[in-house]
Image: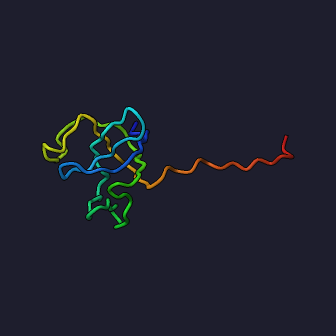
Amino acid sequence: MGGPTGFVDGTIVEANGCVYLQTLGEPSTRYLVIWPFGYSRAGDHIIDGSGLAVAELGGYAWLGGGEAVPGNYGVPDACRVPNVWGAFGVQREPPSPPSFVVDPTDR
């Protein structure tokens, strides 16, 4: 069974009381984020299911997941935009690339 395998990064922004991810670069895209189960908002912070602040308004975020079909998702009409991102992972910075140790004597 397949699942979301992408990522998007940008700035967490608020408009009309709604939280979005605004992508970096041009053209920029504003995504309504469907956060993982257990996530919530506390003031300017996005909190994961264990109570850890994983993102904040105005801050950078890296979201694993994939584009989702626009729909209701239980959000107010004022929050709806054409682009929706179903997040399954949230980080304050991109993951580090894998490190490889190369033995120079191994030929």
**Can you say which quadrant of the picture contains the C terminus?**
top right
Q: How many marks?
A: 0
As drawn, is 9 to the left or to the right of 102? left
Q: Position of residue 79 (x, y in %)?
A: 18, 44
Can you give x and y, in whole percent of width and height, for residue 69 in the image?
26, 34
User: Looking at the picture, does residue 92 appear above or below residue 5?
Assistant: below
Q: Residue at x 48, y 53 (%)?
A: 93
Q: Residue 18: x and y, percent? A: 21, 50
- In front here: 105 or 15? 15
Q: Considering only vertical position in the picture, is 97 above or below 48?
A: above
Q: Residue furthest bottom?
A: 51
**Horizontal side of residue 76 vs 84, given as left or right:** left
Q: Residue at x 19, y 53 (%)?
A: 17
Q: Nearer the viewer, residue 24 or 90?
A: 24
Q: Residue at x 32, y 41 (%)?
A: 85
Please state if 38 lies on the left or on the right of 97 as rendered.
left
Direction from residue 30 to residue 6 in the image, left or right: right
92 lies above or below 69: below
Residue 7 sits in quarter: top left
Where residue 40 appears, as percent x and y from the top left, is 27, 60
Residue 1 occupies which quadrant of the picture? top left
